[in-house]
Amino acid sequence: MTTLEPPVAAERAPARAVAKRDHRSWTGWGFIGPFVAVFALVFLAPIGYSIYLSLFRDQLIGGNSFVGLDNYTQALKDDQFWDSLTRVSLFLAIQVPIMLGIALLIALALDSGRLYGKDFFRIAIFLPYAVPAVVATLMWGFMYGTKYGLVGDINSAFGVTLPDPLSSDLVLASIGNIVTWEFIGYNMLIFYSALRVIPLSLYEAAEIDGAGQFRVVTAIKLPAIRGALVIATIFSIIGSFQLFNEPAILRPLARNAITTDFTPNFYTYSLSFNGQQHNYSAAVAIIMGLITMVIAYVVQLRGMRKGA
Amino acid sequence: MRRTTGRLVRGITLLSVLALGATACGSSDDSSDDSKPVSAGDITAALEKGGTVNVWAWEPTLKSVAANFEKKYPKVKINLVAERSGDKHYTALSNAIAAKKGVPDVAQVEYFALSQYSLTKGLSDLAPYGADKLKAQYTPGPWNAVSDGDKVYGLPMDSGPMAMFYNKKIFDKYKIAVPTTWDEYVTAAEKLHKADPKVYIANDAGDAGFTTSMLWQAGSRPYKVDGTKVSVNFEDAGAKKYTDTWQKLLDKKLVSPINGWTDDWYKGLGDGTIATLTTGAWMPANFVSGVPQASGDWRAAPMPAWTKGDKASAENGGSSLALPELGKNKELAYAFVEYANSGDGVQTRVDEGAFPATVKQLQDPAFLSKKFDYFGGQEANSIFADSAANVASDWSYLPFQQYANSIFNDTVGKAYVSSEKLTAGLKSWQDASIKYGNEQGFTVEQ
C-alpha cells in the first residue's frame, strides 16, 4: 500500500497543479485583457499587416501576387534607400551632438542658479517646442527665401549675397537648424529636470571638499544625469531616422534639392503615395524600423553599461 | 511560466489575425457589364427616376454646371467634392479603387493620367453610352487623349493649347522685340537680363509638365505606348532641339529658379521680374485672380516656334470627366458628364473663364472676339484657338505618367541646380521611368 502511495501523489499533484494553473491564467487574462486588446489593435495589428503586405507585390499590370521575401532583397540592394539612410546618418552625426550639447549647456546654466530671470529663459527656450513642426518649418522656409524671405531682405538691405539655404549643398544643414531650434528646449527640459533631483547634500559635500563649479559639473552633475543623456540621445536618434516633416514641407520650395528619396521615411511615403508601391514601401519601412531599433538598443546598452 | 507565455503569444497572434481580417475584408463590388449599348431611352428613364451622383472634380466652373443640372433634372442630386486636386486627388482615387470602396461615380482625370486608369480597368468605356458619336464635337488633341481605338474613357472638359504670355511693359521699357522663335527667345533673355539683372525671361525650376509640353512642340515623341508595351527615349532629334536651346538658358542663368504656383512666382509675375510665361490657355483666369496688380501689363502671343513660320503647338494640362468602373448610377453619371462637357454645361463653363475643348465654342465668333481687360483689351482667344488647331499630333503620355512626373525633380532637377546637363538629367529620368514600368509589369524598353 505504502509503496503505491508516492505514484498516486505524484500523479495527483500535477493534475492539481494544472487545474490551479489554468484557473490562475484565466484570472490573469482578465487583468491584462484590455491592455492586450488595445496593444494588439493599435500596435501589433498594423505591424502584422505591414509584414503581410511586404510579402506581396501589386503591379499595375498583372495584379497582386505573393513574392515571399523579394521585396526585402530588393530593398537591401536599393541604392536610393541606402543613400537616404546615409543622409540621415550624416544628419544624426552632426545635428544631434550640436543640439544635445547646446541643450546641456543651457540646462547647466539654468541649474547653476546664477542666471537672472531663470524662469523666463526656461520658458523662452522651451517655447519653440510648443510650435507645431509644420508651422515651424513653414516659418523657417519663409525666412530661408532668397527672393522675398528674410535671407533676401538681408541680401538687399546690406548688399551682400548670402548662400541660398535651400540649395542642394546646404539644405540638409538648413533642416538641421530647424530641428535644432525645435528640440533644444525639449532636451533642455529633460536635462534640467534630471539636474533638479540631484540631492543637495552632494553639493554640500563637494563644497566642503573644496570643489569648484567645473568640478561639480564633471564629477556630480554629468554622472547623475547620465540616464537622461542616454534617453535624450535615443529619442534624437529615432527622431533623426524618422525625419519627414521638415523635408516634406520644404520640398515645394526646393524640389530639386529635396528629392522624393531624401530620407528613408520620405522615400517610403513617395513609394506608397506617388508610386502605389505599398508592398515595397512596407518592406523598406520594416527594414528601417529594424535598423533604428538595433542602433537605439546598442546606444542604450553602451550608455547604461558605462553608467553602472 | 513558459506555458503562460506561449498562450499569451497565441492570444496576441489570434487577436492580430482577427484585426487583420477586419482590415483586409474589403467589400466586393459587382461591376456592371459595359459592353452592351445603353440607349438614350435608358438614360432618360434614369434621369426621371433620379438619384445621387458623386463627383470628384476640382474644376471650379463645375459648381454652376451642377446647380444648372439639378435645376433641369430636379430628381437628380449632384454631390460635388472639390477639395482635392492634383496628386492628392489621384492618391484618393487610386486608394478608393484599390479598396473597392467609396469610389466616386464621376472623377476629373487630367489627360496625362487617363491611360493609367484606363489600362488598369479603372474606368468605364463610354462608347456604349454613345460617347463615340461625339468625336466631331472636340478638337483632335483632347479627343486623342480620351480615346483609345473605339473605346472612349472620358469626355474632354477643357484643353490647354499653349501660348506665350509676356509682360509687354517690360519688353517695351527695354525696347526688346517679342520673340517668335526659341532662338529669338534666348537672345531676348540675354538682352533683358543684361538691361536689368533682376529680370528673367521666364521662371523654370524644373517642371515635368512644362518640359514634356516643350518636347511635344519640338517634335520629340519620347513615350510610345502599345498596350502594356512601352518605350521611353529622350534621345530623338526633337529632344535635342529642346535640350540645346534650354541648356543655353540654364548655363547662362537666364531663367529664374522659381517654382510655379508659389508666392515668389506670383510676385515675380506681378513685379515684372518674370517677363514671359509659356503655358496652357487656361492661364488667363489665374492671372486675373493671382496677379491682379499687373492687370494691363500682360499680353498673349503664339508660342515661339522652333523654325521661323512653323505653327506647331502643344498642349499643357487639360482634363476630362471619366466614370470609374466601380462607381454606381452609371446612366446618371454619364448624363451629367455629357451635360457638362458636351451639352449646355460647356457654355456655362466658357462664360466663367474655362478654355473649352469643343469645336463649336472654339469657333464661336463671340468667344474668339472676347476682349480680355486683363490683357489690355486683347482678343486673346483667337491666339489660343489658333494654337488649339495646330497642336502637333501623335503625342502620348506614359501609362504611369503621374509617377514619372513625381520623380522629375529627383532626376532632371539636377540639371537646374548642379553642373549636370539636361540631356544627362533626361537620361536618368528615362532610366528611372523604365525601372518603375518594369516593376509594375509593363514591358518597357528604351
Image (cartoon, rainbow, N blue to C red):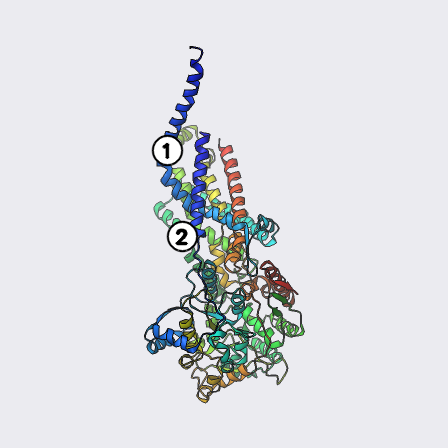
Q: Nearer the viewer, residue A264 or B367?
A: B367
How many residues crowd mark 2 within 10 Å: few (<14), some (14–19), many (20+)?
Answer: some
Tell me the subunit letter for badge 1.
A
Q: Secondary structure at mark 1?
A: helix
Q: Name the amino acid, label 1.
A: Trp
Q: Nearer the viewer, residue A46 or B70?
A: B70
Does the residue at mark 1 contact the one at mark 2 (Cβ under 8 Å)?
no
Q: Secondary structure at mark 2?
A: helix
Q: Earlier in the sequence, mark 1 or mark 2?
A: 1
Looking at the image, residue B149 sits to the left or right of residue A139; the answer is right
Q: Name the amino acid, label 2.
A: Pro
**Residue at image location 54% in from the left, 44% down from the top:** A291
Q: Mark 1 to mark 2: distance in Å?
A: 49 Å
**Number of callouts:** 2
Q: Nearer the viewer, residue B416 or A148?
A: B416
How many residues crowd mark 1 within 10 Å: few (<14), some (14–19), many (20+)?
Answer: few
Q: Quadrant of the N terminus of chain B?
A: top left
Q: Residue A128: give its label.
A: 2
Q: Which residue is mark 1?
A: A26
Q: Specify whether residue B273 is in view.
A: yes
Image location (x, y in percent) of residue A53: 51, 51
Decide: is A69 above or below A146: above
For discs 1 and 2, the disc positioned in front in the rendered view: 1
Q: Are marks 1 and 2 on the same chain?
A: yes
Q: Quadrant of the C terminus of chain B?
A: bottom right
Decide: is A228 above or below A175: above
Image location (x, y in percent) of residue A31: 35, 36
**Residue at image location 51% in from the left, 33% down from the top:** A305
Image location (x, y in percent) of residue A12: 41, 20
